[in-house]
């Protein structure tokens, strides 16, 4: 039953300063959309931390409610695709960026942003996986079309981060020999528990290398950080291998020649998780619910209430938050 009012995490701007509080809002004031959804869970992502701190590259105008992930139950529907009572996942598109996001008890969104919650997945599991796991799934899906487990090692950068950790776990489950690349030397045991067969430290891999090609070492890779890491990953990929690129935290620049592509036939695959085609998105979610479910990560999460979101986002900005953090909005 729809409520007239609900709780939401709201960021407001005043005199160039940004402050966040839990506020009582009216459902009537939600943006236009086909679906009114009562949110059961959301999750914390780095984009949410940027939005909450006033990053105008993520969110243009305030007041605003972040939360790029949400899962919940349809309350009212103006779409033939969904009916009240349906359980849906909403991630990506503009949710939580410039559209009222999942850090609230209710959201209203266009129907084409929503994916049905797979039968073999709980709402909590959906948010433990979240955008990070979905992006990893997209990367694995595209990479697996070109690189088989028998082709050799597959390297994953940013391996302790959300996308990286999910990628390691999924690839391991599919029988790949995974090499985890990380800047965190004290997380080797964690990565091995996820399924990494070998660990490479970032400081040993990201050295600027002017040679156009390096010794072939990997059948493929998933890169989450960009910059010299991606440069060297491509240069180290064996003939007819492939690298999926889904992040640019280190840099958006590539410093390469065309030689890896025309002398070794290496493929560079771009992953756009924000606008990934819906029919493929549903396929990935269905795989994550069953064959690709990263069991090693399903118990590695922190569950918080809406009131704890400000504290956790601050820790995330400081690089002090490990693993997934999900927000329980169901009470």
Image (tube, rainbow, N blue to C red):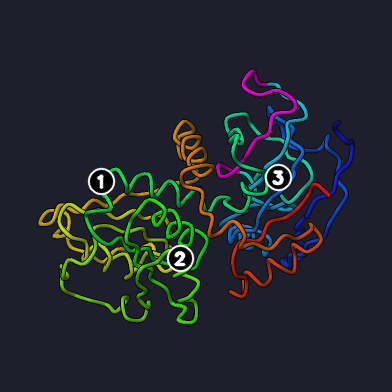
Residue 246 shown left or right of residue 54 in the figure = left
Residue corresponding to mark 1? 146
Q: What number is the disc on residue 249?
A: 2
- Looking at the magenta stretch, what is its main secondary structure? loop
| Residue neighbourhood size for the residue with mark 3, other residues' Cα within 10 Å, grouped as few (<14), some (14–19), many (≥20) | many
* Mark with earlier residue (2, 3): 3
Residue corresponding to mark 3? 100
Total residue callouts: 3
Q: Position of residue 215 (x, y in %)?
A: 16, 70
| Residue neighbourhood size for the residue with mark 2, other residues' Cα within 10 Å, grouped as few (<14), some (14–19), many (≥20) | few
Residue shown at 36% from the left, 68% from the top: 197
* Mark with earlier residue (1, 3): 3
Residue shown at 80% from the left, 46% from the top: 330
Residue shown at 36% from the left, 81% from the top: 203
Residue 331 shown left or right of residue 282 in the figure = right
Residue shown at 58% from the left, 74% from the top: 319
Instruction: Work out whether 116 lies above or below 134.
Output: above
Quarter of the image where the N terminus is located: top right
Label 1 vs label 2: CA separation? 25 Å
Q: Position of residue 156 (x, y in %)?
A: 37, 63
Badge 2 element: loop
Q: Position of residue 63 (x, y in %)?
A: 75, 52
Report if residue 84 lies within the magenta region.
yes
**Residues at marks 1 and 2 touching, judged by CB atoms closer than 8 Å:** no
Label 2 vs label 3: CA separation? 25 Å
Which quarter of the figure has residue 99? Answer: top right
* Mark with earlier residue (1, 2): 1
Instruction: Work out whether 92 lies above or below 12.
Output: above
Magenta segment boundaries in residue numbering: 79-94
Q: Residue furthest left?
A: 263
Badge 3 element: loop
């Amino acid at each position: 039953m729809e409520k007239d009012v609900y709780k939401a995490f709201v960021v407001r701007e005043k005199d160039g300063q940004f402050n966040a509080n839990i506020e009582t809002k009216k459902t009537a004031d939600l943006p236009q959309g086909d679906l009114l959804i009562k949110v059961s869970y959301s999750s914390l992502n780095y984009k949410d931390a940027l939005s909450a701190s006033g990053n105008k590259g993520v969110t243009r105008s305030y007041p605003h409610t972040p939360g790029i992930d949400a899962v919940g139950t349809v309350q009212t529907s103006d779409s033939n695709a969904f009916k009240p009572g349906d359980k849906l996942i909403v991630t990506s598109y503009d949710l939580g960026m410039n559209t009222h996001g999942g850090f609230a008890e209710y959201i209203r969104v266009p129907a084409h942003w929503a994916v049905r919650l797979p039968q073999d997945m709980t709402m909590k599991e959906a948010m433990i996986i979240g955008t990070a796991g979905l992006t990893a799934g997209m990367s694995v899906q595209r990479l697996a079309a070109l690189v088989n487990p028998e082709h050799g090692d597959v390297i994953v950068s940013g391996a302790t981060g959300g996308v990286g950790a999910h990628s390691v776990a999924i690839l391991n489950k599919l029988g790949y020999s995974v090499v985890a690349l990380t800047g965190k030397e004290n997380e080797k045991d964690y990565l091995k528990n996820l399924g990494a067969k070998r660990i490479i430290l970032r400081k040993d891999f990201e050295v600027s290398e002017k040679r156009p090609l390096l010794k072939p070492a990997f059948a493929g890779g998933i890169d989450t950080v960009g910059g010299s890491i991606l440069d060297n990953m491509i240069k180290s990929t064996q003939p007819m291998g492939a690298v999926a690129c889904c992040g640019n935290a280190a840099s958006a620049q590539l410093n390469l020649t065309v030689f890896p592509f025309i002398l070794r036939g290496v493929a560079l695959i771009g992953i756009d998780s924000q606008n990934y085609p819906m029919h493929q998105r549903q396929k990935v979610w269905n795989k994550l619910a069953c064959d690709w479910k990263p069991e090693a990560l399903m118990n590695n999460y922190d569950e918080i209430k809406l009131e704890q979101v400000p504290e956790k986002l601050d820790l995330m900005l400081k690089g002090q938050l490990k693993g997934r953090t999900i927000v329980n909005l169901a009470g």
